[in-house]
Amino acid sequence: MGESIVVLVTASSTDEAVRLAEAVVGEQLAACVNVVPGVRSIYRWQGEVCNEAEVLLVIKSTRAAYPALEKQLVELHSYDVPEVIALPIDRGSPQYLAWLAGQVDID
């Protein structure tokens, strides 16, 4: 179970989020991506506080696939510095985690 991860990424729009999700699942860098609209992000950028509507991607992948997944996300993302944060999955349904691992293929 320690090899499964959740990667959080924010995007500027649903269209961008879907494009990113389809790319990483299509390349088998992720097993599944949830696209969650309606996120409000408040952050500091270039010395100013920003308050923006964003879309959250919840990406399920593996630790081994992370370097390629991060590279793909950064290359395709519209932001200069996209949020790409990986969190370990400590526990989960064994059947789901086996399915997840089986969907991710890094050559």
Image (tube, rainbow, N blue to C red):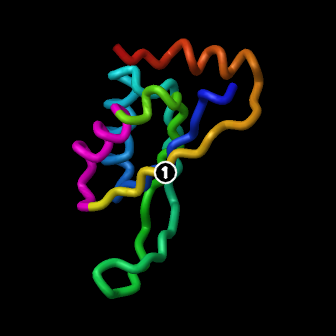
Q: Assign a secondary structure to mark 1.
A: strand
- Left or right side of 106 for 1: right
Q: Amino acid at mark 1?
A: Ile
22 part of magenta stretch = no
Task: Decide: few, some or many residues near mark 1? Use Cα within 10 Å; few <14, some 14-19, many ≥20.
Answer: few
Residue 50 vs 90, above or below: the answer is below
Q: Quadrant of residue 20?
A: top left
Instruction: Give percent across and percent down for residue 47.
Output: 32, 87
Residue 25 vs 51, above or below: the answer is above
Question: Is 66 or 15 nearer to us in this picture?
Answer: 66
Instruction: Give percent across and percent down for residue 94.
Output: 75, 19
Q: Which residue is mark 1?
A: 85
Q: Quadrant of residue 25?
A: top left
Residue 87 vs 55, above or below: the answer is above
Classified by dominant secondary structure, the portion drawn in magenta counts as helix
Q: Residue at x 66, y 29 (%)?
A: 2
Instruction: Give percent across and percent down for residue 10.
Output: 43, 55
Instruction: Give percent across and percent down for residue 101.
Output: 57, 18
Residue 95 vs 87, above or below: the answer is above
- Left or right side of 12 for 60: right
Question: Is 49 or 84 nearer to us in this picture?
Answer: 84
Quadrant location, the C terminus: top left
Q: Residue at x 42, y 51 (%)?
A: 84
Q: Which residues are magenta?
A: 68-80
